[in-house]
Image (cartoon, rainbow, N blue to C red):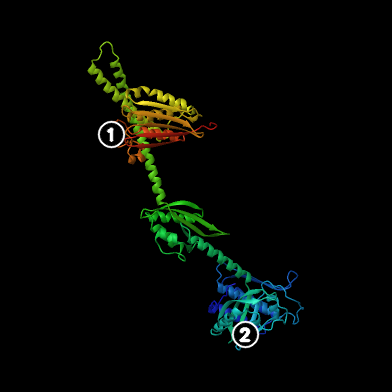
Amino acid sequence: MADRGPLGAHQSPVLAGLLTEATGLVSGETGTEEAVPRLLALLRRVPSVRAAHWLPPGSASPRHSVVVQLDDAATPGDAALVRSLVALIDAVCDRSAPAVPEPRSGASAPVAGRALVVLIDADGDVSASPEAMRDVLGHPLGTVGGLSTIVHPEDLAVVRGAFESTVRHPESQVEVDVRVRHADARWVVLHVAMVNLLDRPGIRAVVAHGQDVTEERRADEQLAIERARLRELVEHLESGVVVDDGERVLLDNAAFTRLFRAPRLPGGPVADLVEQLAGQCADPAETRAHLLAVVASGRPHHGLRLVLADGRVLACDVVPLRARRAAGTFWHFRDITSDEELEESNRALARAAESKSRFVATVSHELRTPLTAVLAFGELLGSSTADPLSDGQAAQLAVVNRNARRLLRLVDDLLLLSRLETHQLTVEWDLVDVAGLVGQVVADHVAMAGREDVRVELAVTPGGAVRGDPARLTQVLDNLLSNALKFTPSGGEVRVDAREDGARWTVSVTDTGIGIPEEDLPTLFDTFTRASNAGVAGVPGSGLGLSICRQIVALHHGSIAVESTVGVGTTVHVRLPLARGEG
C-alpha cells in the first residue's frame, strides 16, 4: 500500500477548542459518570454531527459503544474531530475498567471501532494503553517493547515529520496514515491524528489516536485504480466524452476538446459546460434551453442534434448516472457532418433518379404514340393498291419507315433501361434451353446476314438449362448478333459458340469487323457510350444496347466481357450459371 504523508490539515480554532476542552476532561479528575455525558455534549457541538449516543456494556456487548450520525456535508476535519472525541470517550471508559483485566493468550481479533491512544511528551517518550494495543492490534498485554518496533520502517520518518509539524503549531492537529504490524504479522493501516497539547497543564504531551482504516484504504486504492482505468479508456475514445457529478465536471477527453475547439473542463461547473456547448451552436438560446431541459428531465436522451455555427453537425447522447441517488451525467458527442452530407447526397441522387425515371417514362410515352401512328400510316400508304406510289415516293416512304422504326427502338430501349435501373422490370423466370435459344436467335438473323453478305457460323454443344427469362436472354443475344453484323463489312464472318463446362454456359459472339480501340473498352458498357470509331464508320446506334445487355445478364447472376483488336474484330462473352440440379 502506498505511503501517505502528513496532510497538514490544521483544524479551525473553534474545533480545536472543542478537542482541547475534551482532552482536559480526560486528563482531570472528572469521573466516568460525569465525563461521558460532557464529552457527548461536546461531540454534538461538532457542526456536522446530527446525533451522538453512548451505549453502556451489557449482554449484547461486553464493551460500551458510541454511535455517531454525520450529515452529508461533513468535512474531513469534522470526521477527524469526531474520531478524536470518540477515542477520548474510550479512554475515559477504559480508565474506569478493572485494573487487572482478564488475561488473554496469543493474538486476538481487533475490537471494532476501538482507537489506539498514544501520548508523546516533549522529550519524545511514548506511552500507550496496553489494553488498546491488545484490542486494536491483537498484541497480548506486555508483549510490545516500544511503538517504534511495530511501525513500518518506511513510515518512521513520516511519523517523525508529523510529530515535528504538530509540535511547531500549538493547539493544532495533523493527520497521517501509518502502517503498523499486527500480532498476526500483517500490516494494518492506522489513521493517526496528532493534537499538540504540550502547553496544557496536566497533559504536557502530543496526543495521538489511531483508527484502523486498512479496509477503507484498500477500497480507496481499488477505487483509484478503477478511476484511472476509466479515465484512460475515456481519454482514448474517438468520440467526445464528458462526465459530471451534477455540479462540476469530473472528466473530459481530448476528442471533446477537438470537437468543440475548447480548453479542458474538469473542475468547472456544469453550467459552464452547457454554456460552452450552446455558445458554439447556430442557435445558442434554443440549444441552451433544450440541454438544460434534457438534464433536468433525468431521462436518457440519444442522438440529440447539435448544429454548430461553423456548419458541422454533432450527435449528442445525454445519460443520467445513478447509484442510490442521482450521481451526475454522462455526455457523449460524435461528429455526424459527413454522415448527414452523405445522406443528403443520397437523397438528392434518389430524387434525381426518380425525376429521370419519370421524365424518361413520360417522354417515351409521348414519343411512342405518334411514332406508332407514323409507322401505321406508312404501312397503309405502302400497301395501297387503289393509288400505287411511284418509285420515288416508295423510296421516300421507306426512309420515313426506317427512321420511325429506329426511333421506336430507341424509345423502347430507354423504357427498358429505366425499368432496369429502378428494378421495375418484370421478369418471368423459367428453365431455359440455352442451346435451343442460341440456335433460334442465329436463325432469325440469317436473312440480315445474307443482305450484308456476311457469313454466319454456329457451334453449339448440348448442355443443362439455366434459370432465366427466355425473352430477356433472347434480347441480349439479339443485340450482340445485330452489333456483330452491323460492324462487319461485306465478305466478313460472324461466329457464335455456345458451350457448357459443368458449372455455367459461355456464349461467345465473334466478328471480323472494325474492332474497338483499347482505350474505349473500360467504358463500353456505360449508358449512351459507343466506340470512338463507330461514328467514323457511319454505323448508327444509341449507345444503349450493351448497357442494357450488361444489366440483364447481371439480373441473371451472370457476367459479360469484351475482347477486341482494331482492324481484326471483336468477341463478346456472356457467361450464365447453370440452374441448381443441372450439370
Give the CA separation, mark 1 to mark 2. 112 Å
Q: Is residue 124 visible?
A: yes
Point out the tag, 1 or 2, that comes first from the N-terminus.
Answer: 2
Q: Which residue is at the front of the view, 152 or 284?
A: 152
Q: Amino acid at mark 1?
A: Gly
Q: Secondary structure at mark 1?
A: loop
Q: Where, by quadrant of the figure, is residue 20 drawn?
A: bottom right
Q: From what the image shows, is residue 330 above or below residue 492?
A: below
Find residue 315 and report its horizontal and vertical position in percent: 44, 52
User: Image quarter for residue 154?
Assistant: bottom right
> Is 234 left or right of 568, judged from the image as shown?
right
Q: Position of residue 502 (x, y in %)?
A: 51, 33
Q: Residue at x 39, y 29 (%)?
A: 495
Q: Secondary structure at mark 2?
A: strand
Q: Is residue 188 left or right of residue 553?
A: right
Q: Position of residue 31 (x, y in %)?
A: 69, 81
Asked whether the viewer can see residue 471, the reply is no
Screen quadrant of the N terminus: bottom right
Tell me the residue that label 1 is attached to: 535
Where does residue 87 sit, x and y in percent of width and height? 64, 77
Q: Nearer the viewer, mark 1 or mark 2?
A: 1
Judging depth in this view, the residue of 224 and 243 nearest the camera is: 224
The residue under label 2 is 120
The amino acid pointed to by label 2 is: Ile
Q: Is residue 85 left or right of residue 326?
A: right
Q: Residues within 10 Å of mark 1 (few under 14, many from 20)?
A: few
Q: Residue at the spot x=28%, y=34% of the render?
A: 535
What label sits on residue 561 in the rendered view?
A: none
Q: Is residue 509 above or below residue 303?
A: above
Image height check: is 434 above or below 64? above
